[in-house]
Image (cartoon, coloured by chain):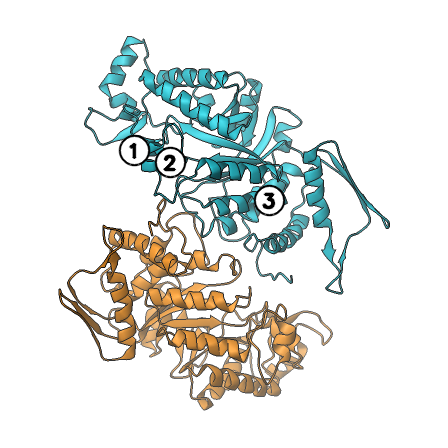
Chain colours: A orange, B cyan
Amino acid sequence: MLNEIKINNSCGILLASSIWGIFRGLETFSQLVYLGTDGSTFVIRSTSIVDYPKFRHRGFLLDTSRHYLPIETITKTLDAMSYSKMNVFHWHMVDDNSFPFQSSVFPNLSDRGAFGNSAIYTKNDVKYVIEHAKRRGIRVIPEIDTPGHTLSWGLGGIPGLLTSCSDPHSNRFGPIDPTVEENYNFIRILLSEVNGLFQDKYLHLGGDEIDTSCWSTNKKIQMFMLRNNMSDVVDLEKYYFANIFNITQNLRTVPIVWEELFDDNIHLDPNAVVQVWKSDLNSSVSKVMKCGHPVIFSSCWYLNYINYGSDWLNFYRCDPTDVVGKNRLFLGGEACMWGEFVDETNLLPVSWPRASAVAEVLWSHVLNETEAKHRLEEHVCRMRRRGIPAQPASGPNYCHY
Amino acid sequence: MLNEIKINNSCGILLASSIWGIFRGLETFSQLVYLGTDGSTFVIRSTSIVDYPKFRHRGFLLDTSRHYLPIETITKTLDAMSYSKMNVFHWHMVDDNSFPFQSSVFPNLSDRGAFGNSAIYTKNDVKYVIEHAKRRGIRVIPEIDTPGHTLSWGLGGIPGLLTSCSDPHSNRFGPIDPTVEENYNFIRILLSEVNGLFQDKYLHLGGDEIDTSCWSTNKKIQMFMLRNNMSDVVDLEKYYFANIFNITQNLRTVPIVWEELFDDNIHLDPNAVVQVWKSDLNSSVSKVMKCGHPVIFSSCWYLNYINYGSDWLNFYRCDPTDVVGKNRLFLGGEACMWGEFVDETNLLPVSWPRASAVAEVLWSHVLNETEAKHRLEEHVCRMRRRGIPAQPASGPNYCHY
């Protein structure tokens, strides 16, 4: 990703050893150009820059289940990400609330589980997003969160998929039923389809906030536990993920999981990446790395939690460098925009420029609030010129062009 | 404003004794129509409604000084207001940060005090806004906030207008200098122009947050106080507003002032309306009414203060009825959207449907959170169909049409 920019009176040179370095260098170059005082000439200063990111993984999470997001909102997000040199789009596609991903093998999942016919991502939509991302140096990691956060899957007509909370006629459902053998076959086919479509090295398996209460009240599951000498519902999680990691190993994909699986001592795939979202830097992150697992960190960068004022400062002040040093197992972080209260009406202004503050923490080796504040004002206006409705960052201001 | 709607199998009748009642009744009628289960027929139930507002003044404040707002953002706000039966647009036009109002008599105020040439409201712009509002049953009350909040006025080339904080060469300026006789002439001409343009019965004079420190450090002003037996800078406020009320009396306009003037025991115009924004209902409101002044209340409806989640509930739970009863001096309230962190990128989603919760408190005689929650979801989708990008109100949801 290293790139070098040299600009003098006669010419400008951009050097990089990879296409990705060229991408980032071009972005830097575009930001070096500014409108001269005559109001019509664009100028650039003589300069010499050697630049490379502090962390490899600079991600942005979008949640398309709690509210459906039109493709244009997603591609605009990708555009804005590239303006802040972010390189991973973490697509939290499906969840309790809706299942917008159209599977070829199981079309009923979205036909019945999406919010509506116009709230579905077809294969072509997904390919379009991946291509749009790729052209901006952004990889797309899909998340298929199981076994919890799957209520909308229950509408898809897969018999026995979700745990019935008590007797077979209950209307309340819990996580995927880990005791049903056919469920693993279903998940294998689904993950295989997703993996084939996205073609990324990573696949996010979720694993967060598993509400095990239905496992405890379902008699069939209790019988299964007895038969298999399981004394705790956590054993069911272990059993479930042993099966899932088996699937991802066969797919030759690197699994990412939310931190609960690590906290619950689930036996992880040796290559599994752990995404820390609940704990602060000092607790879980070091523990996970000590166990040899790479870490993606996001606890302090939840964009959906809004506050009055310049709350980008809270994101900016969360710098992992002191804690993680140069440990290569710390891959980087993600700004997370969960979808409870955002949709196409407000997603872009709520996200930008707040996510740019996260991006700078993940890219820059030197952080400086005062300078960042000025640059952020400039960046807001730059994003607007480029079609991103970035909201005010730090109070009264005006974009002159 | 009373209106009556009767709908049966053969016909629908809307009765009202004024055009304003017809406006509100038509809005109600439009909200009674819904899409039938066949997905293509619009239907309405038989019903009989007698409706009238709880409070007369149901306002929305926009601040066009801290960020410039394009005319379209203002007219969309007016549209959305009418969908929630709000009837007063309080236009906080100018403030410290910029002076976007183009005065015919003093064009330098906006030429130099606006953020830029494209950030100016011409006479035609203002007339367009007033006409747009009028056609929706909304009056427009301009606010020309003095003597504080006027830093941007200082660029307009009116000699001696602002208080120099110490010696004549100081670069720091404070409020309008109350000791300069010519300043009252200037304000008289400006207010007269504003009043002639807006043609509303009311004129908001501001009077909030007067930073008197520069009055205390300016020697000329200290001399003036000595000469006039003034022992406290509050006496300067009294002197200033005695002059200003004299002007508004000649203009035959009813002044509105922020509550500080009442709290500071400034001798108010006997007709002056006091807008309470700092104190809660139980303290100032009753005191102001006891002194015979009408009240507009806004303390608990500051839309600019955002919170994660369904924060419309905080607005909804602030119901003045118990405290003010049927006291006719309580005119109503205003949802205030101060401009520090909103501009055209986010103003509409941040405002709506949160302001609709305020509107319901000000209109409806019966409040019910559970029902309001459902109606608000419906109203969000209705506003979107009508071109207002209203953001999610209470979590995951989807507008089916």
- What number of labels is visible? 3
The residue most toward the bottom is: A250
Q: Which residue is mark 3?
A: B357
Q: Is residue A65 left or right of residue B44?
A: left
| Residue occupying the point 37% across, 68% down | A284
Instruction: Tell me if residue B323 comes above or below residue A344 in the rendering.
Output: above
Q: Is residue B348 left or right of residue A37?
A: right
Do tags 1 and 2 sit on the same chain?
A: yes
Tell me which numbered mark, 2 or 3, is placed earlier along the sequence: 2
Q: Which residue is mark 2?
A: B99
- The kind of secondary structure element at disc 1 is helix
Q: Which residue is mark 1?
A: B155
Instruction: Tell me if residue A254 comes above or below residue A6 in the rendering.
Output: below
Instruction: Tell me if residue B27 comes above or below residue A59 in the rendering.
Output: above
- Chain bearing tag 1 is B
Of tags 2 and 3, which is closer to the observer? 2
**What is the crowding at mark 3: few (fewer than 14 residues within 10 Å), some, or many (at least 20)?**
many
Q: Is residue B117 left or right of residue A6?
A: right
Q: Amino acid at mark 3?
A: Ala
**What is the crowding at mark 1: few (fewer than 14 residues within 10 Å), some, or many (at least 20)?**
many
Tell me which numbered mark, 3 or 1, is placed earlier along the sequence: 1
Of tags 3 and 1, which is closer to the observer? 1
Answer whether labels 1 and 2 touch (C-beta < 8 Å).
Answer: yes
Q: x%, y% of residue A271?
A: 38, 83
* Residue B366 in view of the camera: no
The residue most toward the right is: B10
- The kind of secondary structure element at disc 3 is helix
User: Marks 1/2: CA distance?
Assistant: 9 Å
Q: Quadrant of the N terminus of chain A?
A: bottom left
User: Marks 3/1: CA distance?
Assistant: 39 Å
**What is the crowding at mark 2: few (fewer than 14 residues within 10 Å), some, or many (at least 20)?**
many
